[in-house]
Amino acid sequence: MKKIATILLAAMLTLCLVGCGNGNKGTASVEITDAAEILTTVWATYGEEEMFPVGGGDSEHLSMEGPAAFDVAKAEEMDALLCFPADKASMIDNAASMMHMMNANTFTGGAYHVADAANIATVSDAIKERVMNNHWMCGFPETLIIVQVGDDYLVSAYGNGQLIETFKAKLQAAYEGATEVLVEESLM
């Protein structure tokens, strides 16, 4: 009888611990190969009626078909095109982009692998400051979001409010339980 009680007690304790483990802030470990995978995964969930002309990558590796990798060694280009602060480029080791091909202020998204997860808040804050203090030309983006995916990826996007809301919903659905919105700000 003592053995059965011990086994039941151990089983109940295990279930309690599993239940408590789900009370995190929304991020969980996920298997991600690189930053481009995140944007490509999200873009693949768009229906034909939701899609818009999108390209990605950097000046040497430009894709007209969708999101693509961005060379992190091109810190100044990353700053100019994605509003990723050039002085924080050393904190990431992998990046990707997707931009509206008609007007980047309509939608610009970047995904970044933060080399040391302890720097997530520092990089997120720097992106927010860079976007909020940008001198916009050819229209103003309406909304900025910065989302943590898993332990060590950040995704930032700014542009038209509805496009950003759709992107955020699709990102959260694609990485359910592994995202946390760190920043959601109006730019108007």
Image (cartoon, rainbow, N blue to C red):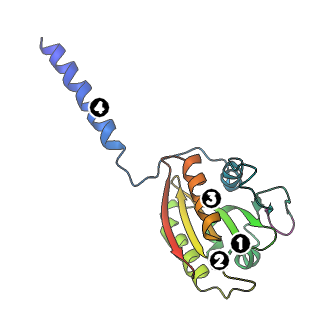
Which residue appears farthest toward the bottom when viewing the image? 135
In which quadrant will I find the N terminus?
Answer: top left
Q: As displayed, is residue 25 above or below residue 29?
A: below
Decide whether residue 58 is among the magenta residues: yes
Q: Which of these two is toward me, 22 or 165?
A: 165
Q: Are marks 3 and 2 in contact (CB under 8 Å)?
A: no
* Amino acid at pointer 2: Pro
Q: Are marks 1 and 2 in contact (CB under 8 Å)?
A: yes
Q: Are marks 2 and 4 in contact (CB under 8 Å)?
A: no
The residue shown at (69%, 86%) is: 136
Q: Spatial distance from mark 4 to mark 3, Cα to Cα?
A: 35 Å
Q: Are marks 1 and 4 in contact (CB under 8 Å)?
A: no
Which residue appears farthest toward the top when viewing the image? 1
In the picture, the disc for residue 15 is 4
Q: Which secondary structure is most common in the magenta stretch?
A: loop
Q: Report which quarter residue 130 is drawn in.
A: bottom right
Magenta span: 55-60
Q: Spatial distance from mark 2 to mark 4, Cα to Cα?
A: 47 Å
Q: Which residue has dot 1 on it?
A: 106
Decide whether residue 71 is among the magenta residues: no
| Disc on the earlier residue, 4 or 3 | 4
In the picture, the disc for residue 141 is 2
